[in-house]
Amino acid sequence: MTRSAAAGAGAAIALEPLMPADVAPLVGWIGGPDELVQWAGPRLFAWPLTVAQLEDYVSGAGDVGRLAFKAVPAGAGREQARPQPLGICELGEFGERQRSAKVCRVLVTPSHRGGGVGRAMVGLLADVAFGEHAVHRLHLNVYSFYAAAIRAYEAAGFRQEGLIRDTTRAGDGYWSTVVMAMLEDDWRGARGRS
């Protein structure tokens, strides 16, 4: 199923399932080991990132309860067989009892950063989580120094809930994590739903 939303400058994007055949360009989106940790956390991938690692990640996503998506220009599927992704993102950590899920691994191609693609992707992920999976709480973690991502998440309707200090060792120091979340009522209000 394809989901669509507006990105910056009136452009529209759609989310489609991320397939192993889509991942080759992603290797070039990550410029070093710290960027890899910033995107995926410290445990999932090893530097240097390879196509094989990404293919394994995508192939096994459904087995571990993750939904991985690519962002493409809305309507691109009709014009070309396999449009290049503008970004990728994931929903995971579904908790049936608590009706929760987590936004993970949001990454926008360098040529489209700052244009609203990330915010649009996260908004579409919220629509999937709340609208299709009936979650009550959608949360995410973002490193505290990543101000552009925090602004994008806030613009999509997430609220900061707290700071966890020195969670990840990277480079010569430690990074702290901001916890953010959106509740079902926040999503309904932002979307004008009752």
Image: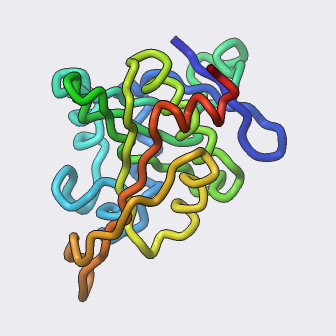
Looking at the picture, tell me which residue is in the foreground, 147 or 24.
147
Say if 138 sits above or below 63 in the image.
below
Q: Position of residue 88 (x, y in %)?
A: 47, 39
Q: Position of residue 180 (x, y in %)?
A: 41, 54
For residue 85, side relative to residue 49 (left or right): right
Looking at the picture, tell me which residue is in the foreground, 105 or 83.
105
Q: Position of residue 11 (x, y in %)?
A: 78, 36
**Measuring 66% from the left and 29% from the top, which residue is drawn there?**
191
Looking at the picture, tell me which residue is in the foreground, 69 or 28.
69
Q: Position of residue 125 (x, y in %)?
A: 49, 32
For the C terminus, the image quarter is top right
**Measuring 69% from the left and 12% from the top, which residue is drawn there?**
78
Say if 157 sits above or below 166 in the image.
above
Colour scheme: rainbow
**Measuring 54% from the left and 70% from the top, which residue is drawn there?**
147
Residue 10 seen: yes
Q: How many marks?
A: 0
Please identify the residue farthest to the right as the structure is shown.
10
For residue 100, side relative to residue 160 (left or right): left
For residue 67, side relative to residue 132 (left or right): left
Q: Quadrant of residue 86?
A: top right
**Measuring 19% from the left and 50% from the top, which residue is drawn there?**
44
Say if 35 sits above or below 19 in the image.
below
Say if 89 sits above or below 180 in the image.
above
